[in-house]
Amino acid sequence: ETGVTQSPTHLIKTRGQQVTLRCSSQSGHNTVSWYQQALGQGPQFIFQYYREEENGRGNFPPRFSGLQFPNYSSELNVNALELDDSALYLCASNQRELTGELFFGEGSRLTVL
Amino acid sequence: RKEVEQDPGPFNVPEGATVAFNCTYSNSASQSFFWYRQDCRKEPKLLMSVYSSGNEDGRFTAQLNRASQYISLLIRDSKLSDSATYLCVVNAEYGNKLVFGAGTILRVKS
């Protein structure tokens, strides 16, 4: 196991609702990245947080937002949910100074009805 | 054009076969390259990094051609347990933003 934990593991929401997903990074890691993986696709980069600030963002609208806390854990918030937001949301952590492996959690599977 | 493109799958091979996956990337400034493995309904996990000189880890060999912006993965003596989706991954020029290909499904059959 990577030591990255995510919650909840599964959830169902309806269009227009808001959702918050949570991630605890692996001990010693100061950077958290969030990815969206739709069925049959590779993970798509949403954004990255380093020392509580956003440090890079992918091609996602502003209704996708996040936070990183002093203990390096993180939240992903999605407002005004759309059907296409149904996906596996993956959190990954690493030590920013080291380029290389990201350690992923098992993901939160979101279904929007 | 997608930033990272992979061979379409699935690849259905018998046990013991040798199989090769190819991948191309569009950003010539990319610095780091990886192959990740993802089992069904699980998270991606690093299989191996890819270096310009090529590198081998047991039955797995990865190659990088920067001039052609091409990455490959060779699996020899395929095992049933190799069945998974293989993701070609490139590190964008800044930070640790990894760009993933769509993945290639490998099914090894007895």
Image (tube, rainbow, N blue to C red):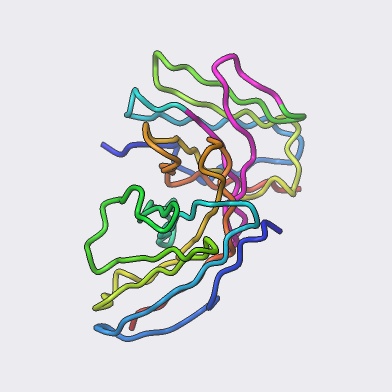
Which corner quadrant of the image does residue A33 belong to? bottom left
Residue at (44, 35) in percent of width and height: B91
Q: Locate residue B46, reporting x and y percent.
A: 62, 43
Q: Locate residue A15, reporting x and y percent.
A: 27, 83
Of A94 and A40, the residue lying toward us: A94
Which corner quadrant of the image does residue B26 belong to? top left
Of A35 and B61, the residue lying toward us: A35
Q: Locate residue B52, reporting x and y percent.
A: 54, 17
Q: Where does the N terminus of chain A fall, quadrant-wise?
A: bottom right
Residue at (67, 56) in percent of width and height: A2
Q: Locate residue B5, reporting x and y percent.
A: 39, 36
Which corner quadrant of the image does residue B27 belong to? top left
Horizontal arrangement in the rendering, residue B30 relative to residue A8 (left or right): left
Q: How many marks?
A: 0
Residue at (56, 45) in percent of width and height: A95
Magenta stretch secondary structure, dominant: strand
Q: Where does the C terminus of chain A fall, quadrant-wise?
A: bottom left
User: Is residue A84 rendered magenta in the image?
Assistant: no
Give the residues drawn in magenta, as a range: B32-56
Horizontal arrangement in the rendering, residue B81 relative to residue A79 (left or right): right
Residue at (69, 30) in percent of width and height: B60
Horizontal arrangement in the rendering, residue B38 relative to residue B67 (left or right): right
**B44 above or below A24?**
above
Horizontal arrangement in the rendering, residue B102 relative to residue A54 (left or right): right
**B20 above or below B37?**
above
User: Is residue B36 rendered magenta in the image?
Assistant: yes
